[in-house]
Amino acid sequence: PIKVKTGEFFGSEIKNTDSCRTMVLQGRTANVPYLQSLKNPAERIIIDKSSILVGRLAGSVDYVIDNNAVGKMHAEILKKDEQFYIIDLNSVNGTFVNGERIVCNTETIIKNGDKITLANEAYTFTV
């Protein structure tokens, strides 16, 4: 059998003791908050810094949503004092938290499990 050392691969731990088995990448235990798309399981907006801009204007936002209903700079997600907020940046089609349209340019608290909708793109917020 081939011996494989335990090491790191893009921040994941690699463990393998049997060359006939598939190598399993085990992610670190750090909890990184994210928005999980409800229509596309592969789409996840990772919130890995204190402020994330989302919208469709590539080069100006941290996460591009390819949907003309979403504003160029649609919303900002903030982390302050261990609390998360979303701010609608004057989008035409709005930002919704659990089905309620939020007021533009106002910090709205978001919590684990909240449904966040940017125009017609729906996500679940997970901490």
Image (cartoon, rainbow, N blue to C red):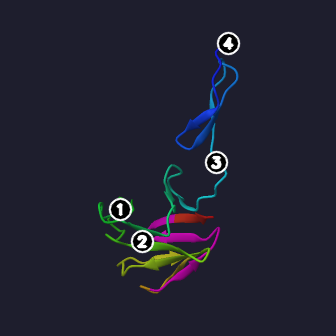
In space, the residues marked 2 and 4 are separated at their CA atoms by: 54 Å
Looking at marks 1 and 3 on the same chain, the residue that comes earlier in the sequence is marked by 3
Q: Residue at x 58, y 37 (%)?
A: 8
Task: Say whether residue 10 is left or right of residue 65.
Answer: right
| Circle 3: residue type | Arg
Q: Nearer the viewer, residue 62 or 50?
A: 50
Amino acid type assigned to the residue bearing label 2 in the image:
Ala
Give the magenta part as a residue range. Answer: 106-122
Confirm or deny contact between disc 2 and disc 1 (CB under 8 A): yes
Numbered tag placed on residue 28 in the rendering: 3
How far is disc 2 from disc 1 in space, using C-alphas?
Answer: 9 Å
On screen, residue 103 versus residue 4, left or right, reads left
| Mark nearer the N terminus (2 vs 4) | 4
Residue 111 in percent (x, y) is at 63, 73
Dividing the image into 4 quarters, which one contains the C terminus?
Answer: bottom right
Question: Of helix, strand and loop, which one carries label 4?
Answer: loop
Asked whether the residues under the numbered discs 1 and 3 touch, taking CB atoms below 8 Å apart as contact, a structural biologist would say: no
The spot of residue 124 in percent (x, y) is 58, 64
- The answer for how far apart the CA atoms under marks 2 and 3 are is 33 Å
The label shown at residue 67 is: 1
Q: Which residue is nearer to you in this view: 52 or 35?
A: 52
Q: In this figure, which residue is indicated by the disc labeled 4? A: 1
